[in-house]
Image (cartoon, coloured by chain):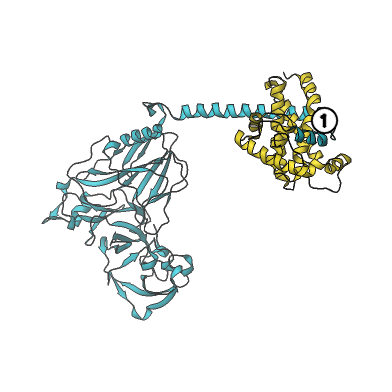
Chain colours: A yellow, B cyan
Amino acid sequence: VPDAAGFEAFYRDNLARIVRACALVTLDVALAEDVAAEAFVRLWSRWGQIHGPDHAGGFVFKTAMRLCAREVRRRGRAPGAERGDVDEVQQALNRHEVIGSLKGLPLRQRQAVVLRDWAGFDTAEVARMLGMKESTVRVHLARGREHLREALRVESENDR
Amino acid sequence: MKGDVRDDAIAEALDGAARIIESTPEKLPHVRRKGNRRRAVRWAAIIAALTTFTGGVGWAALAHKPPGTKPSSAPTRAYADHSNGWSFRYPRAWRVQLFTSCQAAAEGILIANDTNRFTRSEKPGACGAWDFTGHSENLALVQIIHAPFAGGEPRDTQFPLSLYRFARPSILGVSGVPADQWGLNVVQGGRFTYQVWVWFGPRASRTDREAARHLVASIRFQAASIETHRVPRLGICPTARGVATDVPPRPPAVRGDIDGDGRNDRAAVVDVPGFPDACSRFIVVQTVSGRLAARLYEWWAPQMPKVAALARIETARGSDLVVTFDAGGFSRQVAILSIRDGKLVLLTLPEIFIVVDAPREAANLDCAGGPGTGEIVWTTTGSQRGPTTDVLRRFYRLIGTRFQLEPPRTERLRVPTADIGTPRIAPKAPELANLKDVFSSCRVR
């Protein structure tokens, strides 16, 4: 029997994190909320087979990233495309400098940067979540970071 | 490569944007409900897959019994046809289909594990070939038919028949399923009397193959009843009177009123064993009042002549006998016999009547002006010019026992080539609408 209380606690603790990760990838807050909800639906349907919070975290992130990619491709529109009826949160997000920079990144590079630099997963975990080789993840990361640094005029210590 | 080190500056910039987004757990009940549904669907799919797999494995185990399984325990049914002279046992679940051989009066029987009806191939020149298209790949089919040609071998066939002694000719002219076929000419009294064919589809089960083997082993034919030494002879040939006395019209026989007494008679071409091929073929008619015989002077080995039809050409009652014999390719030569003054006589034809069951060289015979008028029309096709073909219709009148040409009635037509062999040509030359049958309009049998 799935542990409902345990799932609820995990859900409350991690919902915002998943929604934010999805929003950074899709650049669409409403879509990010829907995708996050679906990722938690799938997590709950398999909750009895999940072993601990780390496993659950990896599962829900991986599922969310896959759903994000599918939705972005399915909708066939440029990530973060402006819509006429966007809410205040979306407007605030769109105004943010980094969002403008993320729009210029291909989906895979954006996912790699969000998972590695924002979510803090190591390269091997990112590779597993995205279903690609570590070397490919590193290439996507390098290109994505280069683009963002240039756009944000951020210079990391390593670059100096 | 610097991918292994987290870029804090980028992380901070991304986090600054992401922190704008707040989320509340208001969708939790929805997440639980949908998750529960998804779990139920997944379990149902797993159970269905397991059930299907288990059922499939079980079915396969039952369908493919291990080697050595004997079908003898399966219920069988006896079948005996005294008029055709064959009997056998076959599995109860199998289906029997009677048929008449192509362009002949010979009868045959099919016994198969397939309940669909077997039909002939529509291909031109594929006379007699079965079209197996649409039948099961598990097909097992046994066919018994009277020998379609004359001749024989010195050694009679040994019974019980064994599939291992059958020849395995390559499959030619067969449409559809069968992967292999076996055939055997049965020899009795030194003559070919029957043919047995067996076909198997590419996925025929071992059980059905065994059942077919047992069926073949159970086949029995009535022994040849003609004692050759008893047939009176003149020189080296049998006499017609002697044949009429001693040789009954053995199956396959055509039935119908031939002598006009209103009762069924039987007619068949017989090959009297023990005599030279040149004079051993007779047509024998068994009527209620007695038996008549007439020698067939023309025919070509190895095909046996056949009673192709009973047609009412002149006689107001009864019918004339139309005998055909293969003349090569799609061509058949025609002989017409009639009972006159209590004798079976061969009617004299002014020329060699050839009928051809092929649209490119079509030719056919029919009554002209309806049954019993004594008039016939012989239609042949000539040269083909573009999409049309020349057609020549010649009319003959029966006077006594001789047909005579009536030149003034001869018609020369030009018809669309594509119409030959189809109902479209009926208004101009009805005898070319159906090339398979002779004397279609006055045919009794």
Q: Is residue B259 above or below residue B195?
A: below
Q: Mark 1 falls within which chain? A: B
Locate residue A119, reporting x and y percent. Answer: 74, 30
| Quadrant of the image occupied by residue B139 | top left
Q: Nearer the viewer, residue B166 or B239?
A: B166
Q: Nearer the viewer, residue B151 or B57?
A: B57
Q: Residue furthest bottom?
A: B408
Say which residue appears at 82% left-offset and 42% top-offset.
Answer: A97
Q: Amino acid at mark 1?
A: Lys
Locate residue B92, reporting x and y percent. Answer: 43, 33
Locate residue B15, reporting x and y percent. Answer: 80, 33
Q: Is residue B106 above or below residue B360?
A: above
Locate residue A64, reporting x and y percent. Answer: 72, 33
Q: Residue furthest front?
A: A160
Q: Nearer the viewer, residue B337 or A126?
A: A126
Q: Is residue B303 above or below residue B117?
A: below
Does residue A35 show up?
A: no
**Residue designated by label 1:** B27
Q: Residue furthest left?
A: B235
| Quadrant of the image occupied by residue B77 | top left
Say which residue appears at 32% left-offset and 57% top-offset.
Answer: B307
- Looking at the rendered structure, the secondary structure element under dot 1 is helix
Q: Is residue B74 left or right of residue A50?
A: left
Does residue B325 show up?
A: yes
Q: Is residue A41 left or right of residue B437?
A: right
